[in-house]
Image (cartoon, grey):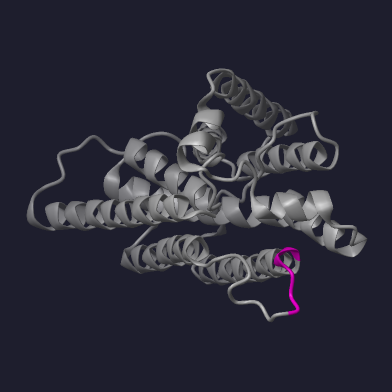
Amino acid sequence: MNELTDQLITLFSSILITVMFLAVAVNIFRRNHAPDTRHPLKWRIPVGHLDMLDIAMCGIIVLYFSLGALLAAATPPGASAPPSTTNMELDSYKVFNGTCLNLILAFVLLVRMFHTGRMEALGLKKHSLKVLLYAPAAGYLLVLAIHFLLDKAGLFQWIEHATNAPAEQSIVSVLRHSSDIPLITVICFSAAIVAPLVEELIFRGYLYPIMKKYTGVWFALITTSLLFGIIHVSLVPFIPLAIFGAVLVLLYEYTGSIWTPIIAHCIFNTATLINILYPGILLPYGT
């Protein structure tokens, strides 16, 4: 990434972290010093089970993802690699390392929820097969339509030109140019299965309800979606990824089941992988 891209990602991440923490702190202060006169939180996702420990875990998770984005933006390609290590190998290592850390984070989260008897609070509950299939498909088509309109409006080309940002993420280059079949298989499995499961449990299943309880539905939807976009450390797909994050929240609220955004996320990433490996078919940005 170039210097301007690094600076923009760093600035936006810093502002987003500050706003999220301040919003939660202000709302906690207000509730402790004045009666809460707001209407009860509605929509489908319950938040009454969340407490101060969840706020602390939320803060750790936000810092984990945000600082990861900041470090990725501040690290020149190949800076931490041995002399014999190519950029492609380094990018592959980063993907593997990041996937392992995310799995550990999701495991810790699941253990906490299991021991408190609140697994359903993560949205891990049954739903009709029709809803689990139709809702994700509708969400994907909506994102596809929005992406098409933004592309036709020239937004992606403008961002790429204004910031001199690369049009594709580094992992996309790995998939397109690597001839290592086992590596490609691992990356595809991680992107199509592991990432949707882990990211939905963390972002929609946990972070969003916490932010919703202490800041409100729309603030939570916007901030967690922006964070979801920024952690991918690429300016060009940032807007469509943030929009996709918002659509996933709406799917979760509409159905009350985390399986709906997980399936939608799997569809989105699988379609993206197909388009990367066989260019010109579907949506050019994955998560």
Q: Nearer the viewer, residue 83 or 206?
A: 83
* Residue 214, percent from left and from top: 29, 50
Q: Nearer the viewer, residue 86 or 244?
A: 86
* Number of residue marks: 0
51 lies left or right of 27:
right
Q: Quadrant of the N terminus?
A: bottom right
Look at the picture and state if 102 lies above or below 124: below
The answer to whether residue 261 is magenta is: no
Q: Residue at x 74, y 39 (%)?
A: 272
Q: Residue at x 84, y 42 (%)?
A: 277
* Residue 97, percent from left and from top: 66, 71
Asked if one can make out residue 64 in the rendered structure from this viewpoint, the answer is: yes
Instruction: Please tell me in which quadrant of the rendered image residue 180 appears.
Output: bottom right
Asked if one can make out residue 243 in the rendered structure from this viewpoint, the answer is: no
* Residue 177, percent from left and from top: 82, 52
Magenta segment, prevailing SS (helix, strand or loop):
loop
Residue at the extreme left of the image, as rendered: 33
Bounds of the magenta segment = 84-88
Instruction: Please tell me in which quadrant of the rendered image residue 154 appears.
Output: top right
Look at the picture and state if 53 lies above or below 22: below
Look at the picture and state if 243 lies above or below 124: above
Residue at the extreme bottom of the image, as rendered: 82
* Residue 16, percent from left and from top: 34, 51
Q: Nearer the viewer, residue 124 or 25?
A: 25
